[in-house]
Image: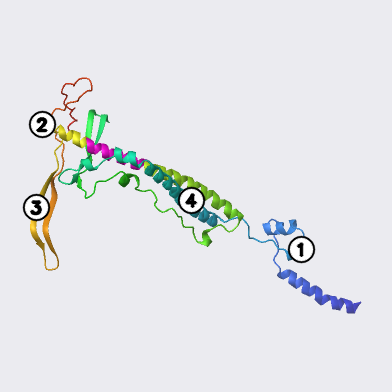
Amino acid sequence: MKRFMFAVLPLMVSFATHAAEEPVLDPSSSDTKSMVETSPPDLDALLNPQSQATTKVTDIRSQLLSGVGHTVGFRGGMAARGHELVDGLNSREPALDAMYKFAPMIAKNGTLPPVIVEARDLSAFTPDQIRTANRVYKIEREERFVSVPPTWRDYLYVGLPVRQSVELPAFEARPQDDAEDQIWKKAVREGWADGYKQADAILEANFHRLTRDYTGMHLYSTLLQADMITTTRVAESQQTVTGDSKQMMLGDKLRRVTDKAKFVTDPGKWRPSVKKDAAKPNPVVAPTAPVPAQ
């Protein structure tokens, strides 16, 4: 018995020593609660430990797929809709050619007339005054030299995509599984719809600009006949031979605008305009004077 006690005593002392070295757990701590509440581990739990990895798409990956997918869809939608719009314009080519003729507007001096915009029945309010005007004219675009008369194509085709193919991103930016595929498809569909709308908006803006310029050039001719605006003056000079030892030009002719069109604000200098009716001619009516600037 004494031998047994002497044999067990070193083990008890060793156990007590190790127990004293272990930290004392606080019953209120979360670590203690988790150790108490969880069940003892088994072999399956050790063989299949729970992992921190998740099968869900990360936020960064989702943003990447959404951004790239929307861009790809947007370009594809614009290209598809732009192709449809261009085909529709080409099918109406004879009507558009007859409707918008810029060649007869070019002056003999080679300038395309300025674009005049007109607004009617305007009013401006300030705390101490109110100002109204029957008509307001403004030079929206000044005259310029052109070598070839513009056409409606120079207006309506601007901004519409000419490339029909859309480049896909690198494989790293493409969907890798079903979850990413759903994010990609949603982004592409939204981008496609936005691209369709953008192409329609571009063509609508182009039509507005075409109508404004074409109507404004005709308005310049009307105001010019009534002496409400001055004509564009162009100076021309010609030299028989110009150049240097590296280059020589024969019959060098130079044209430049010396005086651009300006509004005539003195109504006494205006010329009355005559409006003709199909039944009988109307009396001479002078154009309404715009409100002079103060």
Question: Which residue reaches farthest top?
Answer: 280
Question: Which residue reaches farthest front?
Answer: 94
Task: Indicate how the structure is coloured in the image.
Answer: rainbow
Which residue is pictured at 74% across the width and 62% down the height? 45
Q: Amino acid at mark 3?
A: Ser
Q: Give the mark, 2 or 3, whose residue is nearer the N terminus.
A: 3
Mark 2–mark 3 distance (CA, rounded to whole Å): 31 Å
Which residue is pictured at 9% across the width and 54% down the height? 238
Residue topped by disc 4: 73
Q: Return the x and y of residue 278 as percentages of the image width and height.
A: 23, 22
Q: Return the x and y of residue 244 as percentages of the image width and height.
A: 11, 66
Q: Give the mark, 4 or 3, whose residue is nearer the N terminus.
A: 4
Question: Which residue reaches farthest left?
Answer: 240
Circle 4 crowding by C-alpha within 10 Å: few under 14, some 14–19, many from 20: many
- Taking the image as shown, residue 27 lies to the left or right of residue 131, namely right
State which mark lies toward you, 2 or 3.
3
Mark 4–mark 2 distance (CA, rounded to whole Å): 60 Å
Residue topped by disc 3: 237
Q: Quadrant of residue 118?
A: top left
State which mark lies toward you, 1 or 3.
3
- On screen, 153 above or below 127? below
Residue topped by disc 2: 269
Circle 3 crowding by C-alpha within 10 Å: few under 14, some 14–19, many from 20: few
Q: Looking at the image, how many numbered discs can be counted on the residues?
A: 4
Q: Amino acid at mark 4?
A: Gly
- Contact? badges 4 and 2 (CB < 8 Å): no
Disc assigned to residue 44: 1
- Contact? badges 2 and 1 (CB < 8 Å): no
